[in-house]
Image (spheres, rainbow, N blue to C red):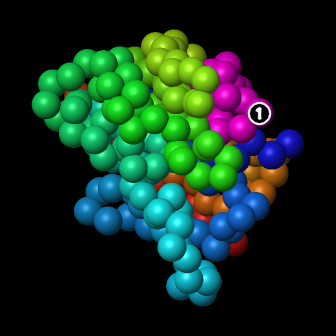
């Protein structure tokens, strides 16, 4: 099944995978503690504004994961002291779904050491929920949050587990863990 981009978050862990039929020539790179999706050196030129963005970024005592430009303002709201629920809801509502040919939803998750929140804004809905177990939301097909059997407990394992998941057209994956006293570990996997 092709579900497009997806996030999985639970208390202490969050991960994101790019799955793409249209723009497979992408990778995750680390820049100053932030994980960024962008084109590979051999990717064809494009003016598509939705293929490069920060996908994992710290904000306050949390880590934000997501599929687009919403990641940065959500992290900034957390830095300002917003609650995770309010940061997710305000930014997803403000930016709305992507105005591309598919009305691609924006998805995001916020992970703290003992709590997690997940959100999606689609053409027909805005959903923001606190979750107590690993929960998935995707841009297509799986666009309502649901429980997900994530077995990883490290960022590196979570990135690899999402990359290797049976959903079709894996491109790259990124993940983060938040431990005691806010210790953050990030990792990514771009395939072989």
Position in image of residue 169 (x %, y %): 77, 57
Between residue 94 and residue 30, name the one nearer to us.
94
- Magenta: predominant secondary structure element? loop
Instruction: Identify whether 176 is placed above or below 10.
Output: below
User: Can the viewer see residue 67?
Assistant: yes
> Image check: 140 left or right of 176?
right
Mark 1 sits on what residue?
Answer: 141
Residue stretch rendered in magenta on the structure: 134-153
Query: Residue 54, percent across and down?
Result: 39, 55
How far across and how far down the image is residue 9, in percent? Answer: 52, 29
58 relative position to 156: left or right = left
Which residue is drawn at the image coordinates 31% and 36% (left, top)?
Answer: 74
Q: Given the current orientation, which residue lies at the most extreme right position?
A: 1
Say whether residue 161 is left or right of residue 169. Answer: left
Q: Quadrant of the N terminus?
A: top right
Q: Is residue 152 magenta?
A: yes
Does 183 appear above or below 157?
above
Q: Residue at x 33, y 56 (%)?
A: 34
Residue 90 appears left or right of 38: left
Q: Position of residue 175 (x, y in %)?
A: 49, 46
Extreme residue in the left direction: 80
x 26%, y 62%: residue: 32
């Amino acid at each position: 099944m092709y579900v497009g981009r997806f996030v999985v978050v639970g208390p202490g862990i969050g991960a994101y995978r790019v799955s793409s039929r249209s723009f497979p020539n992408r990778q995750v790179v680390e820049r100053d503690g932030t994980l960024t999706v962008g084109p590979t050196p051999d990717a064809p030129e494009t003016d598509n504004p939705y293929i490069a963005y920060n996908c994992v970024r710290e904000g306050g005592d949390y880590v934000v994961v997501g599929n687009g430009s919403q990641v940065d303002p959500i992290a900034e709201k957390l830095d300002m002291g917003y609650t995770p629920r309010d940061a997710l809801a305000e930014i997803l509502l403000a930016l709305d779904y992507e105005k591309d040919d598919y009305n691609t939803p924006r998805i995001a998750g916020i992970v703290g050491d003992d709590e997690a929140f997940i959100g999606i804004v689609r053409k027909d809905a805005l959903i923001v929920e606190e979750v107590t177990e690993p929960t998935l939301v995707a841009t297509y097909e799986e666009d309502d949050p649901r429980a997900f059997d994530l077995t990883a407990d490290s960022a590196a394992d979570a990135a690899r587990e999402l990359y290797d998941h049976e959903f079709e057209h894996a491109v790259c994956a990124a993940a983060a863990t938040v431990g005691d006293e806010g210790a953050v570990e990030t990792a990514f996997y771009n395939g072989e």
